[in-house]
Amino acid sequence: MTDHGTTDHGAAERDTPERGTHDRGTHDRGGVAADPSPLFPPRAASPFSSQRAALAGVVAIPVTPFDEAGNVDRATYRALLRRLLDGGVTVVTPNGNTGEFYALSPEERLLVTELTVAEAAGGAAVLAGVGHDLHTAVTSARHARDAGASMIMIHQPVHPYVSQEGWVDYHRAIADAVPGLGVVPYVRNPQLEGRTLARLGALCPNVVGVKYAVPDAARFAAFARDAGLDRFVWVAGLAELYAPAYWAAGATGFTSGLVNVAPDLSIALLTALRAADYPGAMRIWERIRPFEELRAARQSADNVSVVKEALAVLGLCRREVRPPSRTLPGDVRAEVAALVRGWSL
């Protein structure tokens, strides 16, 4: 089995590149040691160091293109992945929400994972999305392991009744099934408590990061500190629109669907944030804000449709999405086209 978790974001040899100046002040954002104090001796290398390093960056969520017959377009999917990798992306999440996870069949989800690992071929970390009922999630996690992924992202349980204890039990069962993989819970539930995640982390050392997607920066800051700011790598799960605010509160990576369309913009935002260049980051943020607001409107109803429309404008992918998503009406399509063409100026 090929280990695809060894890729770094220029942060090799660091156990926790994501923490830097937030707490001890002995490392800068680039992870370069600066006069280490005997009060804080170097930490022993973690078996999940490479996975932690990979999460501290742009976590790309690829779209899943469909052909004229409505099937997964394998060749186009790999071409889109190659464009991401050539654009500087070093961690990809097949079967994320921008990949229409819930609209794919079980067989298609396995296929997308396999295609991703094959195209990444050791050049990027693969963080495979898993979820649904516990049996399906465990089966998908083991398949991702056997295919060669180095991490899994566990989608928030889709169930009307989720207790704090049951949330731990669900994630623990999946994490325990693949002890050699890094595990990243996808947190969208504002009622989840930070101490609940702390309990999961104490039980499962392979839970290495958190994709936090509750649209409340103050809640995120409190949740991360209640759970353990240094215990996990914190990924801003609401993409570029929330990345600067979450970064200031402790995130060191962010997810992105925009990166499918304009990888240079996403990488530029990451570079500015890593350099603590917040004015520069906000200039980039303003450029992409209208696009991300289209995706976020009406509870993200057109999240995937906007990205696929932009790819269609560039001639890279068909615009079709599966229900309950829908293709965009003509006026919104024109707006997306204008934004994308403006970026190329």
Image (cartoon, grey):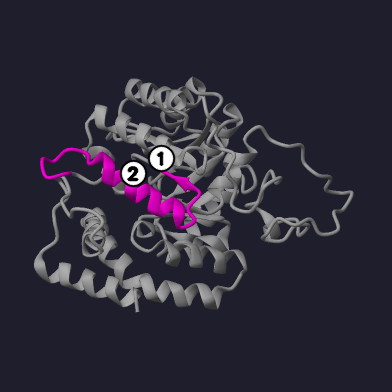
Query: Does residue 29 appear anywhere in the picture?
Result: yes
Looking at marks 2 and 1 on the same chain, the residue that comes earlier in the sequence is marked by 2
**Residue 119, numbered label:** 1
Highlighted range, magenta: 67-93
Badge 1 density bin: few <14, some 14–19, many ≥20, Cα 10 Å: some
Taking the image as shown, residue 128 lies to the left or right of residue 324, namely right
Q: Between 190 and 182, which is closer to the camera in this rendering?
A: 182
Whether label 2 touches label 1, CB < 8 Å: yes
Q: Where is residue 321 drawn, in percent x and y?
A: 17, 49
Query: Does residue 62 appear anywhere in the picture?
Result: no
Q: Where is residue 328 drawn, in percent x and y?
A: 14, 61
Q: Is residue 91 magenta?
A: yes
Residue at point 56%, 60% (across, down): 249
Question: Which part of the image, by quadrant, shows the C terminus?
Answer: bottom left
Q: Quadrant of residue 27?
A: bottom right
Residue at point 50%, 67% (across, down): 268
Q: Is residue 62 magenta?
A: no
Amino acid found under the numbered disc labelled 2: Arg
Element carrying mark 2: helix
Amino acid found under the numbered disc labelled 1: Glu
Q: Where is residue 141 drawn, in percent x and y?
A: 42, 26
Badge 2 density bin: few <14, some 14–19, many ≥20, Cα 10 Å: some
**Tag 2 residue:** 78
Residue at point 23%, 54% (across, down): 317
Q: Where is residue 215 drawn, in percent x and y?
A: 39, 58
